[in-house]
Amino acid sequence: MAKRPSHSANPRSKQPDRSGRRAGPATGQRWSYVVAAWVVIFGAFLVVAYFVLPDELPAILQRLLGLVCAGLAATVFAVATREQEDELVHRLRRGQHLDFGKRLRSARKQRRTINLPIIGQTHMRVIAGVAVFLLVTAWWWTPWAPICVRKISVEDLAVPLGNEIAAAVLVMPDGQAPTLQPPIVPWRTRQMASLIAEDASPYELGMKAIAQGRTDDARDRLSAALKEGKTDALQVHVARAQAEMFACQFGEAVKWYANALKLKPADPGLLGQAAVAWMHAGSFENAEPLVEKAVQTCRAKHTEEDAELAAALHIQAVFLIGRGKEYDKAEVLNKKAQDTWSKTLGEEHSCVAASLNNQAVLYQIRAKYSGVPQLDNWAREIWSKGRKEEQHPLVAGSLSNLAMLDCLLGRYGQARSRNDQALTIRRNTLPPTHPIIALTSTSEAVVMLALGKYKEALPLASEALTTLEKELGPGHTAVAPTLNALATLYTAEARFAKAEPYHLRAIGTAKSALGPEHPYVSVCLNSLGRLYLAQGRLDEAETMAVEALRIAEKTLGEDHPTVAAGLAVRGVALFGKGDPREARPFLEKALQIREDTFGKEHALVAETLGDLAALDDSPRTYTKGISRYRRAIEMDKRLLGDEHPAVARLLVGLARLYVKRGKYADAAPCLKEALEIRRKSLVRFHPFLADTLEAYAEVLRNVKPPNPTQAAALEAQARQVRDKHTEEDRPE
């Protein structure tokens, strides 16, 4: 009987291995598939690099692809050169290759190792793989690579710098004076400048120096570019003007803009920048024709929905706000510029933020306080987008403006917090002598003045004035608010002889820089009027108030807080001259405006209530006067604190009303408290302190039982105070 053929006799039949599994395809064959797959992947990558991807890519992407290519090449090498010892073992198990030992020994003889310093014994195959990786990486960096690094092309920096100048931003150093903030190089422009190579042209290097704040270097480079003649002279003149603008040398800037306009007199962008330069230089008269020409030229060239026309309208709005006239027209122009920029440049463009900021400033000037915070917040969100708030100086401007709004509304704690934040940002992002830092110090001094902290406020205002006069010149518009703040502080410190020249300088600067009919002139006149009230120069105080009222009513309307300030000064002056009936209508109107504007709870409302209460000294109105004084005292204590000088002023007024009715026992505690406050809050030679001492002495002589000894001591102290004031209050 024939035997069946054994399965093992057929070499192609698959026999189970010792583990019971059938043997698959040969391991060497499978490994060939793996090698082929990696070769295909590497080839596909090269095909994509050569024929699909662009010829140039940004450096970071090009280098990343180079690393991928080198990694693939090293992987293909490692896979293709892997040792096949595992295949020999597998074949031995299948009963094949009886010469296994010989072949295994041969494979082992082919192995090569090498001892390397630090690394130790290393296989030659590993070294070869690293070499492949490095060779492919080096090849990728050569011009023969399939993808090259895209050459960095930096646009002419004059464009973003010019846009920043044209997008003029207004700030409010004391909450009442709109001031053009000196232009600041945008941080993106500084980033672009860092990409300009050191072997670039003198013009490009000059623009780089402007963006990096190296003004002297910029001047030298641009002068070299002008001499070289390879760059258009117009470009160099504009660049030099921009260099002076960002260095706050506005007088020099207008000269270079004039040179540029001779070469291209009808360029609207250039006209707008030149107009802004003139406004920064304090000459609105020279700016006006340039603004008008820029708007007319844009309207002749473009449609209403054009970004260049929007810039011209924005500058025209800034001009009208700065001149303090036609606020309605300014609001329309600013809104038109804002809408156009939003459509053409996008709602998150910095120009849109500038228009929102200026609209907020316009609302604050016109006492439309409710609309200011939202506009300021929108502007701040745009400016800070893509960058942390604490790194953006324009964000600081918005915070400072809000701080001044808080100060006007009596939110002094919030005002200090925001102003401190603004000052920190500006100190961290700008040079220590930059005028904007000085403007922030002025704002801080104004807040401290409102809080009655005169000793802390004086150094701030004094240092700010020194910086502004040095950096911008003594006649610059930004100097006027600081002069007025410093003058008011000297008045509060009873340095009347020193205060008056600063008041007069503030008025003169405001008139020359802004115009004799500007609303801020009215603010400065009212401040001088209060000085004259403190000195008892009542006729002069009334004269200042009359002129201030005329200007304020003409430019701001009859219900503006600045009008109320003039009414209050005039009413107090008339009362001091013995005309209480004539004084009452002025003070009642002032109270009405202040309550309508600020509400029933405000320090200015308390001040006016005290002024009106002083009029209520007749038997018929006496009770009303007492009630008004008490309401005002309670209000000031809540808003300003128990030891504020304003509280002492009201307590003295209440005591005098009691004395007039013969109620010395009621007057005594009022004067005692007022004396304690004034001793703590006023300088030791303040005449108001002497007034309080004398009033208290009179009460002690008439109270039951009288105390003539203490009264005499108080009168002696009052004489010492007045003598000391005479010694201290002298003209410099």
Image: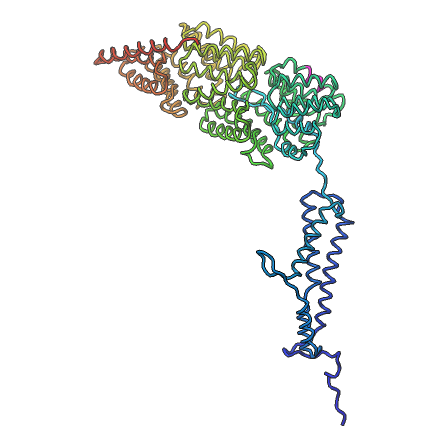
Question: Which of these two is toward me, 271 or 231?
Answer: 231
Question: How has the structure been colored for display?
Answer: rainbow
What kind of secondary structure does the magenta stretch mostly adopt?
helix
Question: Which of these two is toward me, 367 or 158?
Answer: 158
> Could you tell me residue 316's position as x and y percent?
65, 20
x 41%, y 12%: residue:
495
The quadrant holding residue 412 is: top left
Q: Is residue 494 magenta?
A: no
Question: Which residue is at the far left?
Answer: 705
Q: Is residue 293 magenta?
A: yes
Residue 698 seen from this side: no
- Relative to residue 421, is residue 238 depicted above or below? above
Q: Which residues are magenta?
A: 289-295
Residue 729 seen from this side: yes
Question: Which of these two is toward me, 229 or 520?
Answer: 229
**Screen quadrant of the N terminus:** bottom right
> Could you tell me residue 263's position as x and y percent?
75, 18
Number of numbered labels in the structure image: 0
**Screen quadrant of the C terminus:** top left
Q: With 652 as the anchor, is 238 left or right in this view? A: right
The quadrant holding residue 127 is: bottom right
Question: Which of these two is toward me, 539 or 420?
Answer: 420
> Could you tell me residue 83's position as x and y percent?
68, 67
Question: Which residue is at the far right?
Answer: 51
Q: With 56 as the anchor, is 190 left or right in this view? A: left
> Could you tell me residue 371's position as x and y percent?
56, 27
